[in-house]
């Protein structure tokens, strides 16, 4: 999958999960790094890119950055595809699953 995504997505994956608004990982420098990379991503994203983005959700909304991931993921042609979402109980992944299941009814 790594070869099928643009450099901006590799940069996001290297940054890791979005920081929580409640812990020290939400330093201004880290938040700015996420924001700058997210702002450079043009829609639509590929399904491989959507799958990469789906792994980056943190435990909360991360000062609104989680919504940016949701909107980018949902821009992928062919979305919704539940098979590209990780299997976990993250609230943002569950939100995407719920929205995707309602879209396919």
Image (cartoon, rainbow, N blue to C red):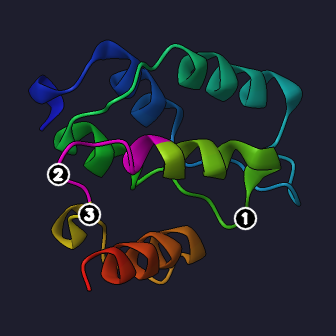
Of callouts 3 and 1, the N-terminal one: 1
> Whole-Å distance between the Cαs marked 2 and 3?
6 Å
For disc 2, the marked residue is: 78
**Which residue is outermost to the front?**
105
> At 40% from the left edge and 18% from the top edge, which residue is drawn?
8
> At 44% from the left edge and 74% from the top edge, which residue is drawn?
99
Element under disc 3: loop
Element under disc 2: loop
- The part of the chain drawn in magenta is 72-79
Q: Indicate the quadrant where residue 57 lies.
A: bottom right
Q: Is the magenta stretch mostly helix, strand or loop?
A: loop
User: Residue 92 appears at what percent x and percent y?
Assistant: 55, 68
> At 55% from the left edge and 49% from the top edge, which residue is drawn?
17
For disc 3, the marked residue is: 80
Q: In this view, does 8 lie above or below 69?
A: above
User: Residue 100 appears at what percent x and percent y?
Assistant: 35, 73
Which quadrant is the N terminus positioned in? Answer: top left
Q: Are marks 1 and 2 in contact (CB under 8 Å)?
A: no
For disc 1, the marked residue is: 60
Q: Which of marks 1 and 2 is in front?
A: 2
> Whole-Å distance between the Cαs marked 3 and 1?
22 Å
Q: Which of marks 3 and 1 is in front?
A: 3
């Amino acid at each position: 999958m790594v070869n099928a995504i643009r450099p901006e997505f590799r940069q996001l994956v290297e940054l890791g999960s979005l920081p929580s608004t409640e812990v020290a990982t939400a330093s201004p420098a880290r938040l700015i790094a996420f924001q700058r990379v997210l702002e450079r991503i043009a829609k639509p994203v590929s399904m491989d890119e959507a799958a990469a983005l789906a792994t980056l959700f943190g435990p909360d909304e991360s000062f609104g950055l989680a919504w940016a991931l949701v909107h980018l993921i949902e821009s992928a042609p062919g979305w919704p595809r539940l098979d590209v979402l990780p299997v976990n109980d993250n609230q943002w992944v569950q939100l995407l699953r719920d929205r995707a299941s309602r879209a396919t009814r």
